């Protein structure tokens, strides 16, 4: 391998620095293409892989783009050891990513995201109700703005030793995206166009044997002297009569004279021809990317534009995204270099569907409550000529006022939302080379965006009409300077630098909401509020000043030792913090010199990183509430802040072994790690007599211990055919060791009904607390005198964290044809399903039909309290009701899955077909989330139990179906 020598192009960001090492040719121009075995590491530094003393993994950009991914974070699922990705298949929804488990009870557990040296804000704006499944729209994460078509490579720095130079925000590791740039000596024009289709896949199976109502017989009413059968349309359950084609009834839409074809027209009591599945569309995504890169005498430039249009499976929902990027680097003189990257992104979502247990959640109305005889073809006529709603859930047959549920088509066409985000991010920098060994660099990095979200509930809805508007502004700027010295001394090599960083971040939120309803139908403005609208605004500002340094020594390309240090001074904490790390590696293949050993390295690392905190956490400030009688209302917050609060401290130890054999036909990489976090920041419950409910303190300890393993094999390799296999495995053992004194758990949140999510001492983070079955000495479930299963006291029912994750990718290439497919597996973890609980309660789910024999009733398997076999007969509706308010464990499921995550087939057209006009044409077909196995509850995809990327996970409140995707891309190179 060629050494990294002398001149270096530096791109540094502290709080996110980027430093690019490149080899300088004789003419002093920078070349990176000649460096072998080089990967991007912390601060964007390009390093020879053999010298690294910590765990990292690289994913090439084509792995993301070839599979038609629109989310650059979700694309990592199954591809990286040590990383857990939860990527629900909602329209632009949140992607949850963690590395090496969970380290903080209430703080940030996601890694730092860096794009071309810019620490990219990844704010998730979903409120707590949305995240806990209580209803709301998932507006996704800010990293949705990353353009997959622009990605050159992704480097995952998995722990503290790898990411310590990034400071307090990289305590959970870092994910570094490097975008494409022009290659010296080449001019290239690329057009990439593709389309993909999403179809519903995993969703609860609904029974088709019984209709709506709560009685075994239909009601009878008399209209104009004629008697008709009807179900009770005010009853949103399906414990009604069994279907009978000879039984006629008046459907819900037979009472409006203006619909002459439906008015008082009887129809058979049968399962609907157009059922729930007919409501959903085939989602379509169009992606078009155009890029041009040009190499001039002293400058390289690349311009890229991508247009993405996504229409969702829910009608009248879409996302539009435009990405424009410009990448420049130039030599202003022999010693002075300049570079810049500019990105503009506009993301516009319309009517992202509500999920969870909410008024506008169609998933809740389809799978938890409803009447199973409803035909969705008839539901499409959802509005009267006067603009009012036609809902099946009538208050009475002669009162059309919706009682609980809106017509789903009213929901998606009248109760809509908009979200818009305009974003600019990038960097500019100068580097001056005093000598080939010594240079200085300065850079400025910026990320700023504004986001507006509006939502509306129309007059005539079951819920109170309203209009809400939220505006967010976010900006972060980093200014950095660094002095760098590199040299070789005989058998020794030295790479060193020292620098500073100034980080300044601001964000503000403005909310406005109508009160008491709306006055004029169709006018969505705060001034249309029945009562005075309410508004609130919040503003935040934080800054961090940093000094940092790194020293790396090498001996004979065999021994490497590296030490880094960084000190941060915070605006939000009293004390500054110092973050040291030490790593070392021994390339033993340079000693053994065996033909069968291509490469072998032993490595070890240690780091100590302190996490940051929110601004204004040291002091307690009064909040201003809604004015009363024209006077402002002031109140103290529920939590008393601590002026002496300290950051959480995270200590990581790791050791790894990697080797490759037989000319790199076989290779592995194994890492063992031990992570301990202390001084956890938690709101400790206190006596309300103090005037507060909680006091913020430092207390507790959490540990993560685990193994990461990768295996690469090339079973077949000939001149025409290659078969590569890559396998990765992650097992992490998380444990909350202690909180404070006798405090045994901290409640994170509660589901819409019943269970709670907690951090409990002695267990893995994210424990689901609820009631379990009661068992006798022989392990039999105990049934009470009412025929229901007896419920235990509140206890842990399992953690949302999995036991292990695994991915297996196969890549086959034959001449110009290639195929790649990835299996992604998760074992263990738990989630609570509100859809299962209410779907059984209301008689909607297939299981509740009892195979078409509800009339026989149910005897629960188990024993009575006297030990005798249970013989208490429950009628079907009473049995269904037992899924609520008794044993929560009936609705807690294992989150394991095996998925065919993606499949890609590509073909490069030969020159005999495309001629000399084009450099190349590649056609690829892809599929994502094609198949899933090993689901404990067949009706819910375990990944679809997430409605945000924060700490609240595993509470399914009402999820839309998961989707599988098919599509193709055509790539032209001119």
Image (cartoon, helix red, strand yellow):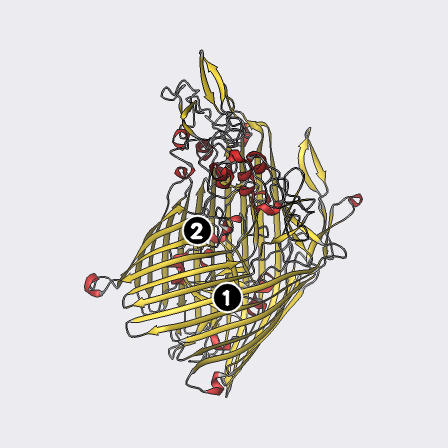
859 shown above or below 196: above
Can see residue 55?
Answer: yes
Q: How many marks?
A: 2
As helix, strand or loop, the secondary structure at mark 2 comes to strand
Residue toward you, 91 or 45: 91
Query: Which residue corresponds to mark 2?
Result: 345
Q: Quadrant of residue 340?
A: bottom left
**Occupied quadrant, residue 789:** top right
Please provide percent x and percent y for residue 815.
27, 68
Instruction: Give residue 59's position: percent from left, percent from top.
Output: 44, 65
**Is residue 486 left or right of 284 when viewed as pictured?**
right
Camera-nearest label, 1 or 2: 1
Label 1: state its secondary structure: strand
Q: Quadrant of the N terminus?
A: bottom left
Name, please, the residue furthest toward the front.
868
Mark identifier at residue 240: none
Of mark 1 and mark 2, the one earlier in the sequence is 2
On screen, residue 106 versus residue 196, left or right, reads right
User: On the image, numbered disc 1 is attached to which residue?
Assistant: 729
- Residue 334 sits above or below residue 559 on the image: above
Between the C-alphas of marks 1 and 2, the distance is 35 Å
Q: Residue at x 37, y 50 (%)?
A: 307
Name the residue nearer the viewer: 555 or 501: 555
Residue at the image position 35 percent from the left and 56 percent from the top: 926
Within-10-Å neighbours for mark 1: few <14, some 14–19, many 20+: many
Q: Nearer the viewer, residue 882 or 294?
A: 882
Along the line of sight, the residue nearer the viewer: 871 or 674: 871
């Amino acid at each position: 391998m060629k050494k990294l020598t002398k001149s270096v192009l530096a791109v540094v960001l502290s709080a996110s620095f980027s430093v690019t090492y490149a080899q300088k040719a004789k003419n002093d121009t920078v070349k990176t293409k000649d460096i072998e075995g080089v990967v991007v590491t912390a601060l964007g530094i390009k390093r020879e892989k053999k010298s690294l003393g910590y765990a990292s993994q690289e994913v090439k950009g084509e792995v993301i783009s070839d599979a038609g991914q629109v989310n650059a974070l979700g694309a990592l699922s199954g591809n990286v050891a040590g990383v857990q990705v939860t990527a629900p298949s909602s329209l632009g929804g949140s992607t949850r990513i963690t590395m090496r488990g969970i380290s903080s009870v209430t703080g940030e557990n996601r890694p730092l995201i860096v794009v071309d040296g810019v620490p990219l804000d990844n704010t998730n704006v979903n409120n707590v109700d949305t995240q806990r499944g209580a209803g709301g729209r998932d507006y996704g994460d800010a990293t949705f703005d990353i353009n997959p078509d622009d990605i050159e490579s992704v480097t995952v720095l998995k722990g503290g030793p790898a990411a310590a130079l990034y400071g307090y925000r990289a305590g959970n590791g870092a994910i570094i995206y490097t975008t494409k740039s022009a290659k010296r000596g080449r001019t290239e024009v690329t057009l990439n166009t593709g389309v993909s289709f999403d179809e519903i896949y995993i969703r609860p199976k609904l029974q088709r044997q019984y209709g709506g109502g709560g009685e075994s017989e239909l009601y009878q009413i008399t209209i104009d002297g004629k008697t008709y059968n009807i179900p009770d349309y005010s009853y949103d359950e399906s414990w009604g009569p069994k279907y009978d084609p000879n039984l006629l009834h008046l459907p819900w839409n037979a009472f409006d004279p203006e619909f002459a074809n439906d008015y008082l027209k009887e129809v058979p009591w049968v399962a609907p021809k157009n059922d729930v599945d007919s409501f959903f569309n085939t989602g379509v995504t169009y992606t078009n990317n155009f890029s041009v890169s040009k190499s001039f005498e002293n400058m390289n430039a690349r311009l890229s534009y991508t247009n993405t249009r996504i229409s969702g499976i829910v009608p009248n929902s879409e996302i539009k995204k435009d990405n424009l990027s410009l990448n420049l680097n130039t030599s202003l003189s022999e010693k002075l270099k300049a570079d810049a990257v500019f990105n503009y992104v506009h993301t516009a979502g319309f009517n992202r569907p509500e999920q969870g247990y909410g008024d506008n959640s169609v998933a809740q109305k389809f799978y938890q409550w409803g009447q199973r005889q409803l035909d969705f073809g008839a539901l499409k006529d959802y509005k009267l000529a006067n603009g009012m709603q036609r809902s099946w859930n009538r208050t009475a047959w002669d009162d059309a006022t919706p009682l609980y549920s809106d017509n789903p088509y009213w929901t998606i066409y009248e109760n809509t939302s908009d979200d818009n985000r305009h974003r600019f991010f990038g960097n500019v920098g100068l580097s001056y080379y005093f000598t080939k060994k010594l240079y200085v660099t300065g850079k400025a990095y910026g990320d700023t965006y504004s986001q507006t979200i509006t939502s509306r509930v129309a007059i005539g809805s079951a819920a109170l009409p309203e209009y809400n508007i939220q505006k967010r502004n976010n900006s972060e700027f980093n200014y950095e300077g660094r002095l760098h010295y590199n040299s070789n001394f005989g058998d020794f090599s030295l790479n060193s630098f020292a620098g500073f960083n100034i980080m300044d971040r601001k964000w503000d939120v403005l909310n406005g909401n109508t009160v008491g309803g709306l006055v004029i139908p169709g006018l969505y403005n705060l001034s249309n509020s029945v009562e005075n609208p309410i508004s609130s605004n919040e503003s935040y500002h934080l800054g961090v000043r940093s000094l940092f340094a790194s020293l790396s020594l090498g001996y004979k390309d065999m021994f490497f030792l590296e030490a880094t240090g960084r000190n941060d001074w915070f605006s939000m904490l009293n004390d500054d913090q110092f973050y040291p790390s030490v790593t070392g590696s021994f390339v033993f293949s340079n000693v053994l010199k065996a033909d069968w050993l291509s490469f072998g390295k032993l490595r070890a690392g240690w780091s100590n990183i302190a996490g940051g905190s929110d601004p204004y956490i040291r002091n307690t400030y009064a909040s201003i509430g809604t004015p009363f009688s024209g006077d402002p209302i002031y109140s103290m917050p529920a939590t008393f802040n601590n002026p002496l609060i300290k950051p959480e401290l995270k200590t990581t130890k790791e050791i790894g072994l990697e080797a490759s054999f037989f000319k790199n036909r076989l290779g592995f990489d194994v890492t063992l790690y031990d992570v301990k976090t202390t001084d956890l920041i938690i709101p400790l419950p206190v006596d309300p007599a103090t005037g507060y409910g909680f006091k913020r303190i430092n207390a507790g300890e959490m540990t993560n211990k685990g193994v990461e393993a990768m295996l690469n094999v090339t079973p077949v390799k000939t001149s025409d055919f290659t078969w590569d296999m890559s396998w990765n495995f992650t097992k992490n053992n998380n444990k909350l060791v202690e909180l404070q004194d006798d405090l045994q758990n901290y409640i994170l949140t509660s589901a819409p009904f019943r269970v709670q999510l907690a951090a409990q001492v002695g267990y893995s983070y994210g424990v689901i607390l609820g009631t379990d079955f009661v068992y006798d000495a022989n392990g039999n479930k105990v049934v009470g005198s009412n025929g229901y299963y007896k419920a235990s006291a509140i206890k842990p029912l399992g953690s949302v964290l999995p036991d292990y994750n695994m991915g297996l990718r196969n890549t086959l290439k034959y001449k110009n044809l290639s195929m790649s497919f990835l299996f992604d597996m998760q074992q263990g973890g738990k989630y609570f399903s509100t859809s299962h609980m209410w779907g059984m309660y209301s008689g909607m789910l297939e299981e509740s039909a009892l195979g078409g024999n509800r009339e026989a009733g149910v005897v629960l398997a188990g024993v009575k309290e006297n030990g005798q076999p249970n013989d208490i007969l429950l009628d079907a509706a009473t049995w269904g009701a037992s899924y609520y308010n008794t044993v929560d464990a009936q609705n807690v499921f294992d989150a394991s899955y095996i998925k065919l995550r993606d499949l890609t087939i590509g073909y490069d057209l030969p020159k005999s077909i495309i001629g000399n006009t084009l450099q190349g044409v590649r056609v690829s077909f892809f599929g994502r989330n094609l198949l899933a196995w090993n689901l404990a509850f067949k009706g819910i995809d375990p990944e679809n139990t997430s409605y945000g990327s924060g700490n609240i996970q595993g509470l399914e409140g009402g999820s839309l179906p998961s989707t599988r995707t098919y599509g193709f891309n055509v790539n032209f190179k001119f």
